[in-house]
Image (cartoon, helix red, strand yellow):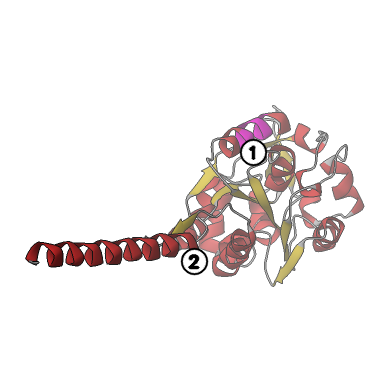
Amino acid sequence: MQRSRFFVMMLVVATAYAATGDAQSSYRRTAPVIAKPAAKPAIVLVHGAFANASGWDAVIRILQAQGYEVSAVENPLSSYEADIETTKRLIDAQKGPTVVVAHSYGGAVMTAAATNPNVKALVYLAAFANDANEPLGALLEKYPSKALTAFVPDSGGFLTIDRAKFHDVFAQDLPLAETTVMAVTQKPLNNSAFKAATTVAAWRSVPSWFVVAQHDNVINPDLERFFAKRMGATTTEINSSHVVFMSHPKEVAAVIEAAARAVSTTTATIKKP
């Protein structure tokens, strides 16, 4: 009799365990799928003429504080082709979705170099956004600026901006003490860059953002507006000189972050145990 009761109890326990297992299995099958937050894209910064990568200092600090992996290319400015190659090498080194940001002449370099499929957004800051077979010199002639009379050539065919005109032409909204140093340390650009042209235009297939510097004396603001409209860019206008990323780093960083947030990344999914 006792043995019979024992077997009955064991049968009840086994049945209950099996029911629990079925419930757990069912829960695993029907548990809600939770999207894992998308990883932030990498950000590559491309400087322009008469400058170097150190000019991005303030923007880099802001983006790093927000958790972005930031890289800044150091272009030789020895030729358009060399700058494209150098920039493309850094872009291609990124491991996932990437936002590329460029200032001034750097925009023309980015336009030709950002053809990697990982590039999901382009941000132009008071920059050239030339089309294929469209040399920069012709654009400057159509939309002239004060810079055209401020260029000083050397014996090797490289251009700098006249030091006496540097503040008013390049960065009139920065302190004079700062622009005096910038004028002395400016990085020359090979004059051939104005005659060269790209065979591709990345902005034709990549979503773009554009910051127009309303008081730009290097690239005519109307030329910037032309670029932005032609590419259908998300456009922001800032009351700034040519070096908008230096005089208004917070506003510029906000535009870059907006582009980064818009980047589509593959989301991983996880299930509750």
Residue 148 x %, y %: 80, 49
| Residue 123 painted magenta | no
| Residue 212, image quadrant | bottom right
Q: Is residue 193 visible?
A: yes
**Secondary structure of the magenta portion, mostly?**
helix
Q: Secondary structure at mark 1?
A: loop
Residue 12 x %, y %: 24, 67
Using the image as rendered, state which of residue 182 and residue 250 is in the foreground: 250
Left or right of 194? Residue 31 is: left
Task: Quadrant for the N terminus, please.
Answer: bottom left
Q: Amino acid at mark 2?
A: Pro
Gap in Å between the C-alphas at discs 1 and 2?
58 Å
Task: Quadrant for the C terminus, please.
Answer: bottom left
| Residue 87 painted magenta | yes
Mark whose residue sits in front, 1 or 2: 2
The residues colored magenta run: 82-88
* Furthest residue toward front: 1
Q: Which residue carries the number 2 mark?
A: 32
Q: Looking at the image, is mark 1 or mark 2 earlier in the sequence? A: 2
Using the image as rendered, state which of residue 167 and residue 112 is in the foreground: 112
Residue 261 x %, y %: 59, 63
Q: Which residue carries the number 1 mark?
A: 188
* Furthest residue toward left: 2
* Residue 61 - label: none
